[in-house]
Image (cartoon, rainbow, N blue to C red):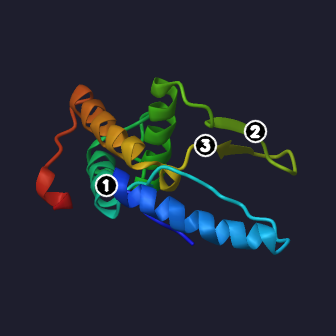
């Protein structure tokens, strides 16, 4: 079961109903896992930050080269994580020892709040780096 809880009365009623289900399972000898998480980033947020990254990729260079949208997403997510003091961005030797593999933060795991913060950070980064972001591309 998965519930989206938005306000106190609805959340309270849902928790009472869930307790009855949990109680029946436990009394029946079953183990139950209850997980509470923040709401994940929204589809409009996802669309917006991908549109911004697309505009950055069209205009920006890094290390003297142009990079595609996926490469820019990795660069920007890594810098965002660093600026926020988040753990997760690192590089490590490949399994066969011949390459370097980037491990890092993934935007699909963002909460709604992190998604909003990433959008604001992208807009700030773009402005600081002379990138012209046009809003209609994500509306």
User: Could you tell whether 123 is left or right of 80 in the image?
Assistant: left
Instruction: Tell me if residue 126 comes above or below residue 97 in the rendering.
Output: above
Percent position of residue 74, x then y = 50, 45
Residue that badge 3 annotates: 104
| Mark 2 neighbour class, 10 Å CA radius: few under 14, some 14 to 19, many 20 or more | few
Q: At 70% across and 66% down in the image, what residue appears? A: 23
Quadrant of the snapshot with the N terminus:
bottom right
| Mark 3 neighbour class, 10 Å CA radius: few under 14, some 14 to 19, many 20 or more | some
Mark 2 or 1 closer to N-term? Answer: 1
Label 2: state its secondary structure: strand
The image quadrant of residue 4 is bottom left
Residue that badge 2 annotates: 92
Percent position of residue 95, x then y = 85, 50
Q: Nearer the viewer, residue 55 or 137?
A: 137
Count every numbered label the image shows and give the total.
Answer: 3
Q: At 40% across and 54% down in the image, what residue appears? A: 41
Closer to us: mark 1 or mark 3?
1
Mark 3 or 2 closer to N-term? Answer: 2
Instruction: Tell me if residue 34 comes above or below residue 123 in the rendering.
Output: below
Mark 1 or 3 closer to N-term? Answer: 1
Spatial separation of the CA atoms under disc 3 and disc 2: 11 Å
The image quadrant of residue 83 is top left
Q: Nearer the viewer, residue 74 or 1?
A: 1
| Mark 1 neighbour class, 10 Å CA radius: few under 14, some 14 to 19, many 20 or more | some
Residue that badge 1 annotates: 45
Percent position of residue 68, x then y = 42, 54
């Amino acid at each position: 079961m998965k519930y989206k809880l938005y306000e106190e009365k609805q959340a309270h009623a849902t928790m009472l109903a869930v307790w009855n289900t949990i109680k029946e399972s436990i009394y029946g000898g079953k183990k139950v896992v209850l997980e509470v998480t923040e709401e994940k980033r929204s589809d409009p947020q996802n669309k917006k930050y991908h549109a911004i990254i697309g505009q950055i990729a069209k205009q920006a260079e890094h290390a003297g080269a142009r990079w595609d949208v996926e490469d820019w997403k990795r660069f920007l997510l890594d810098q965002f994580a660093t600026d926020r003091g988040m753990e997760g961005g690192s590089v490590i030797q490949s399994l066969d020892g011949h390459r370097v593999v980037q491990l890092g933060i993934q935007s699909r795991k963002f909460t709604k709040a992190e998604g909003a913060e990433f959008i604001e950070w992208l807009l700030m980064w773009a402005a600081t780096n002379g990138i012209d972001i046009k809003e209609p591309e994500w509306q």
